[in-house]
Amino acid sequence: MTLLGKIFGYYSQYTGMSILMSLFFVALAYVALKDKNRNNKTIILYGTVGILFLIFNPLLYYVYSTYVDAGSYWRVFWILPMAIGIAYVGAELVKDHRITGFLLLIFALFLGGKLVYTISPEFKFATNEYHINQSTVDVADYLDTLDLDHYMVAVPYEMLADIRQYNINIRMPYGREQYDEKWGIRTGFFELMIADNVDFSLLADKCRFNNTKYLVINAGKPQLDDPGENGFTLLKSVGGYEIYEYMGI
């Protein structure tokens, strides 16, 4: 595949099934044909043409893919002033044709979007004011009663992204960079925490080396060995998770 073909592939990845990019091009056509304001044309129309020329330039793609990351080239499309262009033209339509323009704008936006909760099971209705899984909140509240000043906490995969958003006092031996292998080499500690079975003997070594006194384990995960024999004490079960204290440090 040519470099230009790869760029169009990322363009397709960026636009997906949405019609927002089509609305943006309609907005550009409106600015080109109807708008008499030079400043608007410079920012929305001419600026977009210049950006598109750079994005679809094989030389830029070559430099980006060589020195940055080819897999994330679709993010370059974020610099297009899509929101500004669509919002501006939508406001102009409503200003000149209040009822018709407003109805047309609502209809276009309705066609251009999807209910976020139907896209992926990862999106769920908020159950609290923090917009964080309630189990994570409950676990964090209990952890806050422990000695977090001197020791770290190892949490499972699903808590990694948001537990510190709720309580910054919770320090962990690994961070959310573990989500993507491109960000760095996954730690052995994290690999043990996401394994299908809980190996307390190996986790004890990781806890001792990383000054980690507390483990948050999925309650239903099979255990390969006895936690008590490896220095772990079950403190409490919270929201489908078991919180252990490692007594070896």
Image (spheres, grey):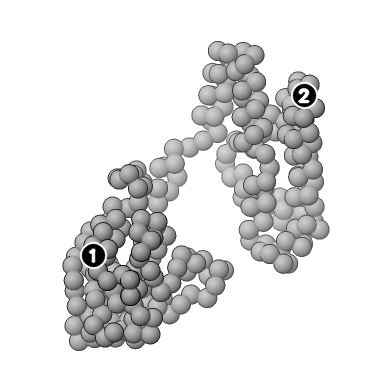
Q: Is residue 27 left or right of residue 114?
A: right
Which residue bears the numbered disc 2?
37
Q: Quadrant of the N terminus?
A: bottom right
Q: How crowded is mark 2: few (under 14 residues within 10 Å), some or many (20 or more)?
A: few
Labelled disc at residue 190: none
Residue density around tag 1, few if under 14, some if 14–19, many if 20 or more, within 10 Å: few
Question: Marks 1 and 2, how far apart in space?
Answer: 61 Å
- Is residue 108 or residue 164 the one in the foreground? 164
Dot 1 or dot 2, earlier in sequence: 2
| Marks 1 & 2, CB-CB < 8 Å contact | no
83 over 75 or under it: above or below: above
Viewer-nearest residue: 226 or 174: 174
Label 1 or label 2, whichever lies nearer to me, is 1
- Secondary structure beneath disc 2? loop
Q: Position of residue 134 (x, y in %)?
A: 28, 52
- Can residue 226 be seen at all in this image of the molecule? no
Q: Can residue 200 be seen in this view?
A: yes
Amino acid tagged 1: Thr
Instruction: Note whether 160 is above or below 30 in the view shown.
Output: below
Percent position of residue 60, x then y: 78, 57
Q: In this view, does 53 lie to the left or right of 9?
A: right
